Amino acid sequence: MKVAVAKETQVGERRVALVPDGVARLSKAGVEVVVEAGAGERAFLTDQAFVAAGARLVPNAAALQAEADVLLKVQPPSLAEVEQLREGTTLISFLPPQASLDLIRRLAERRITAFSLELVPRSTKAQGMDALSSMSTIAGYKGVLLAAVAQPRLFPLMVTAAGTLAPARVLIIGAGVAGLQAIATARRLGAIVQAFDVRAATKEHVESLGATFLQPDLKDEKAEATGGYARELSREAQDRNLETIGKALKETDVVISTAQVPGKPAPRLITERMVKEMRPGSVIVDLATESGGNCELAEAGKEIERHRVIILGPVNVASSVPFHASSMFSRNVSTLLLYLLKDGRLSLDFSDEIVKAMCLTHEGSVVHELPKKLLEPMPAGVVPQGV
Ligand code: NAD
């Protein structure tokens, strides 16, 4: 079986799906690994390093696709790339099911078996395959560094001959995977850290990292959905929580916001009025702008200044740490591949919880319930939502 590693084509993408260590891991299991020349270049991984680990190089994407039994990518393929794939190829990449419906339909029509890394189940068994969490870890870390560079103050307490400088006060909104890493990073830099999340379970994690937990006001509302994710809150609960966040923001130098609700726009938790009340020179790093943003002033991909507050909306943050992001991604996909291999070949058992959760298309059909439902034609007389 041949596993192919593509050179990413999306503008600004610097990661590669498999690193030399992953090549060695798969080769040991009897898999042949083929790598497109230059695939690791932007992550500072040379072609020679891939060859030394046991891979064979091919000169371009066409040569790679002609051989691939399994194609590994970080970003979803473009529609044009899907047309180039051989029928029967298995694709493993990020592939958000709600946002890629045309792509999913075409993958099925072209008889590609597609696995979405957004759909790794949140179970102990699948933890080692969870590339989304790996990338969130990197985003949380890098988000704090971006804030440290942008802010006009220092992070740690400094006692110097020129006076004592107070430590930065940091607020982390959303204490999931990215938020917890942001807490740890801000603490390592010497900041005083507070964190806010609507899931009660996060309190313990926040406190174990040496930060203070800001208690949400939910009354009787349940904030936790299945799989450890948050659910969307009612308008009233959201407003009560805005008050709590607003109060904390007045005494905060740096905010890192990471709040997300799967399949929904990111909750709006920082309004313009709240920004106006922050201290001049404060910094907001909104890590949720790709799904709409937590701060109503943040702009995806931009650094702006509003009301004397610096607001960053970085996108694809993991790609800005391409060496380690690729290394973690590679570990996650190679763990998935080894799980799917039986006697050196891919063997898909659709009663398996991981296969069932992640596989979108197989043998000419859309097999996953979520895109299947979204792709179903509307019964006559039903007006689609949003029209
Ligand atoms: P995420 O990226 O979907 O959300 C980030 C955080 O935002 C979450 O903690 C969420 O509660 C919070 N949030 C949502 N709405 C909010 C609001 N209105 N106000 C404030 N905060 C809000 O989630 P994630 O970080 O990927 O994961 C969440 C949790 O899932 C993790 O903390 C972990 O416990 C669990 N998890 C389990 C596994 C596993 O078992 N294999 C893997 C990864 C994560």
Image (cartoon, rainbow, N blue to C red):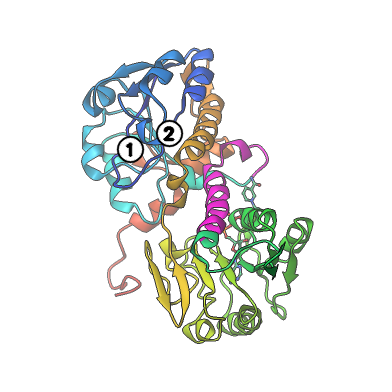
Q: Are marks 2 and 1 in contact (CB under 8 Å)?
A: yes
Q: Which residues are magenta?
A: 123-146
Image quadrant of ligand 1?
A: bottom right
Q: Quadrant of the N terminus?
A: top left
The amino acid on which the numbered mark 2 sits, given as a three-letter code, is Ala
Q: Quadrant of residue 81?
A: top left
Note whether residue 1 is visible: no
Tell me what residue is drawn at x 54 percent, y 31 percent.
331
In the figure, 367 relative to 315: above or below? above
Q: Residue at x 59, y 75 (%)?
A: 233
Residue 162 falls inside the magenta stretch: no
Q: Which residue is mark 1?
A: 8
Q: Main secondary structure of the magenta part?
A: helix
Apparent side of residue 300 relative to residue 182 in the rendered image (left or right): left
**Can you identify the residue that label 2 sits on?**
17
Numbered mark located on residue 341 in the image: none
In the rendered image, residue 22, in percent from the top left (x then y), is placed at 50, 24
Residue 268 visible within the image? yes
Task: Assess disc 1: are there few (<14), some (14-19) or many (≥20) residues with their C-alpha within 10 Å of its C-alpha.
Answer: many
Closer to the N terminus: mark 2 or mark 1?
1
- As for residue 139 lying within the magenta part, the answer is yes
Q: Residue at x 58, y 55 (%)?
A: 178
